[in-house]
Image (spheres, rainbow, N blue to C red):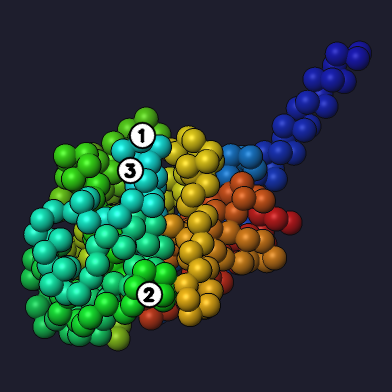
Amino acid sequence: MKKVFNITLIGILFLSNLTNAQSLETKLQTLIDTIYTSNPTSVGIMASIESPEHNISWSGANGYSNSKNKTKLYPDQPVLIASNTKTYVSAAILRLVENGQLSINQPIKNLLTIKTRDLFKQGGYNLDSIKVKHLLSHTSGIENYANNAYTDLIQNNKKYRWTRDEQLELTIKVGPPLGKPETVFSYTDANYLLLTEIIENLTEQPFYTAIRELLFYKSLNINSTWFPTLEEIPEGTKPLVHQYWGKYNWDSNEIDVSADLYGGGGIASTLKDLASFTYKLFNYEIVKDTNVLNLIYTEILTKDSKQSNYYFGISQYGFKGLTGYGHGGFWGTIVVYFPELKTSVAVCVLEKDKSGLKYEIVEKIVGLINQ
């Protein structure tokens, strides 16, 4: 009789856990559906959660992957994650630190090509004083080429094929240095373009190949993540969604990806891959040396005393009283890892003009998980 009771109790607990999991998934999808119904001009909303400790691995979506053709949006379609790419570049740099190939306190001068060194020297930069950590934290004093004038250049020639060298040249043309390293915080993609050049020079591989290998995509089952046009689309991957910016009448599929491809942005990924990568990064499955990974939380205070909440390729966020770490992207993306919940949440809103919704979605998802 005792054995029967134990078996029955186990069965009840199993069914209870299963019901709770199903209930949460239903609530999560209802959340996405409700927000989309209230905001149909968002085109499409996608979300993904990775939380092994809570037995959650969920993705959901509502809306259209192509607003013109009214094509249904699926949760496992890839998106352009834009500046979320910076976290991948930062992680790759930390892997090189872990391998003993690099130090974050190393001046960047001898890590760059002669061409880039000469370009920045002519632009008034002292590359002996700019260190790897300054690029990672946007405290290098380097100007930002990705400004309104750059947006106009893209608008006037959406199919133009940019090179990294051209974008670095634009950086110099924008103007002189903003100041010496650690003088000001200034978010600029050029910092991360220089980091991908450093990755290439140290690994003697194209940066996208090196990142794939350094971050263990294959062994960690990061299967639907790639740099479009630089790498082949992974087998079995669904079509890339269309992401929009109504203000300029932009459709991401009508703009050459090279406008944002070389480290400041560039990666295409499913939200499941994005959430999974983020979870695995912060749980030491990629950078395994605790001391090295913890460098990612380094905050470099600048002389202007302005707090940036930006570290090495990640920002700090607060949702529902919880602190999270992650990054956002130009095309309406965000991913945040919450250490207290051991949970990563990735969201994409397909219309940039409605991208503020991503914060509301993360907030409400955290509320559901943390009930």
- Who is closer to the viewer here, 63 or 237? 237
Q: Is residue 30 visible from the viewing direction of this image?
A: no
Residue 180 position in % (x across, y down): 34, 73
Q: Name the residue under label 3.
A: 102
Residue 176 position in % (x across, y down): 23, 80
Q: Mark 2 points at which residue?
A: 186
Q: Are marks 1 and 3 in contact (CB under 8 Å)?
A: yes
- Who is closer to the viewer here, 35 or 139? 139
CA separation in Å, label 3 and label 2: 24 Å
Q: In this view, does 311 lie to the left or right of 228?
A: right
Which residue does the image show at 31% across and 79% down from the upper left? 178
- Who is closer to the viewer here, 44 or 303? 303
Q: Which of marks 3 and 2 is in front?
A: 3
Q: In which quarter of the image is the N terminus?
A: top right
Vertical comparison of 132 with 257: above or below: above
Secondary element under disc 2, as helix, strand or loop, is loop
Which residue does the image show at 47% across and 61% down from the upper left? 311
Q: Mark 1 points at which residue?
A: 99
Q: Quadrant of the C terminus?
A: bottom right
